[in-house]
Image (tube, helix red, strand yellow):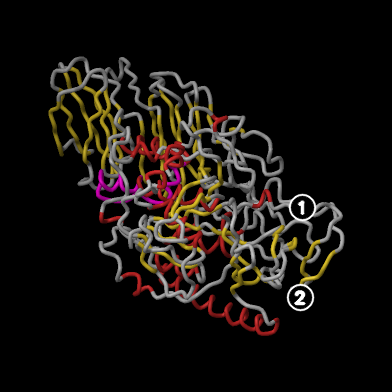
Amino acid sequence: MSSKKIFFILLFFSSAFLHAQISNQAVTSVNANQQQFSNWLKEKWQSEQNKIQSFINQRNITKWSKDHNGNISLFYGFSPNGLPEYITTTYSTLASVTVGANNLWEQGSSGLNLFGNISILKNRVGIWDSGRPLNSHIELASRVSAGDTGAIGVSSHSTSVAGIIMDKGINVDARGMSYGLQGIVSYDFYNDIAEMSAASSFLLLSNHSYVTKCGWYYGNTSDPSAASRWEFWGGPKDTVDYNFGYYGSLSQNVDSIVFNAPYYTIVKAAGNNRTSNGPAIGDSYWRRDSSANWFFVPHRDSLISSNNGYDIISTMGNAKNIITIGSIFPIINGYSQPSDVQLTSYSSWGPTDDGRIKPDIVAPGENILSASSASDSSYNLFGGTSAATPVVTGSLLLLQQLYYQMHNQFIHAATVKALVVHTANAAGTSPGPNYQSGWGLLNVSKSADVIRNLNYNNILFERRLLQGSDTSFKVIASGNGPLTFTICWTDPPGTIDSINYRDNHTPKLINDLDIAVTDGSSLFLPWTLDVNNPSLPATQKNNSVDNVEKIEIPNAIAGKEYKVTISHKNILRNGFQDYSFVASGVNGVKTSDENPFGLVIIPNPVLNNCLIRFKAFNNSNAVITLFDVKGKRLKQETITPTIPITNYSLDVSFLSKGIYFINMQQNGVSKTVKMEKL
């Protein structure tokens, strides 16, 4: 069952109802504008409901409906051309092996024992779907709380989505990615945007396995109980549904939510449109006129798109600040090479209309065993991007758990996305990303390795770039694998063009950050794709559309110094932009007559903690001293170096912003380097 479909609308949300169920004080934060934005969304929703109800009364139709194929439909709103819009759902252990989550579990190869079990994670994941999961199921074990007061009942689709995230593993083959999670919050997708905004103060992740109905649909919207027929959902004279690739109000609103709630990661299904191709050329179908009346068309024109190429991800899936998920077949023995990643035939491809890379990532979404709502002990094989999405959601929670256990705090959504992009397993026939599988296959095991940094060959930090203030620092290549750099930032919401809304290539990026790396003779730039030639391989050049950039230097020279520069174009909205940075392959130290220890500070500038990395002469004691610009000694520590490379963690959180110096001495030799404290 690769796809189950559902339409969609909005309902009022009572935040007090859900806050009472949160057992731990939130350690995330939201912008003060978020409550004002939530109130505006509720008012906007109520106004929209009045229009919808008036339309329903005039046409004698229903908001919710269910056809004989089991497709549940919900009237959601109106498009820029005035036509009604609907939303629809897109319809193990093998999945965990494919994305590496099993390595993080109890008895996993990492030894981390991560399975979402710590109490601070309870009710930090939300599910918006077609109804309630079956809370009495033995796999869910009464761990599902209602986040709203929606009247929709138990849903098979919602039950399977919840199961992929948190099935306990009574049946070991159905074990969820975060099987120890103590609680999850469930909503129907009636008024999802306002509810998401209100819940963003305590949620770390939310799962959205549904899409806006676009292009070709096989069903019967006018009479759900009647025989199915092919319906084309584009405009009255359109040959392509403009909603594919479009950055509209849904995309803008979720970008606003994440921008105001920087710890909140939204995980969204790309959709299953590539196999919903419409009738044969010349066969009959139905479509709408400018008054939203369905009419019969006896012969299909060959010019109408079959939804089987590029640019077929709809509305909310095109937002900048979320993670959009495509579907692949599970990899039985785990990933070993790009050809292992086989896309399912239905998984929707990007790009967005402005050329941004979508989907962001792919995950297994075919024949995933999960809890079913048929009974308290039943299971089913669930499929579609609806299944791939909760594989990602449940897996990403393990990364938040790991970071929290190490640092007693969570990471930003931009950092989560940076890790996902940085560590993705390559997919496709050419290096770099593509518009079919995005940045590749999720690899949470490798992401966890970056966070742990056991071999001190990774860098991970969250930083702020000020208007007109570029940041540069140097790293040394280890030679063990490629030298890789990734930046990601939560961009301010883009602008909507409700007039020129068909395939408008105008970038939606507001704050255009850039990363560049040089070794003194060569310049290395990030991957980018061409919206006008979507099938061409990625190239390395300036990227002015994506809010994530990645540079890979596959043949970096061990011991060689590389300079990293993070900058911006034009004027930064608000005068600054927070960003997340990840680097790998930097475990090298370069010595010289001027720097006999190869002494380096990582990162530099530094926020709270840094690594003092050097190559000691031997294992006799070394003295590290911290000075201010006036030469006053602020801190001094004596350490025993490790051979060949020493990585010493230094806490500088007590320092004020400014310039400082770190001196190291061993065997009568001394070296001082400058450090900037942010």
Q: Is residue 416 magenta?
A: yes
The secondary structure that dominates the magenta segment is helix
Q: Residue at x 64, y 84 (%)?
A: 54
Q: Is residue 106 positioned above or below 616 on the image?
A: below
155 or 124: nearer the viewer: 155
Quadrant in the picture for the C terminus: top left
SS class, disc 1: loop
- The amino acid type of the residue labelled 1 equals Ser
Q: Is residue 245 positioned above or below 639 on the image?
A: below
Disc on res. 305: 1
SS class, disc 2: loop
The region drawn magenta spans: 399-420
Q: Residue at x 15, y 24 (%)?
A: 640
Circle nearer the N terminus (2, 1): 2
> Does residue 451 appear left or right of residue 352 in this picture?
left
204 or 138: nearer the viewer: 138
- Where on the picture, by quarter, is residue 531? top right
Give the percent coordinates (x, y) of residue 667. 15, 16
Give the percent coordinates (x, y) of residue 402. 30, 44
- Where on the picture, by quarter, is residue 120? bottom left
Q: Residues within 10 Å of mark 2 (few under 14, many from 20)?
A: few
Q: Is residue 670 positioned above or below 202 on the image?
A: above
Q: Residue at x 65, y 71 (%)?
A: 78
607 or 213: nearer the viewer: 213
Give the percent coordinates (x, y) of residue 641. 19, 22
Give the percent coordinates (x, y) of residue 669. 19, 18
The reply to whether residue 613 is in sight is: yes
Disc on res. 116: none
> Does residue 237 appear left or right of residue 578 in this picture?
right
- The amino acid type of the residue labelled 2 equals Ser
Q: Which residue is mark 2?
A: 291
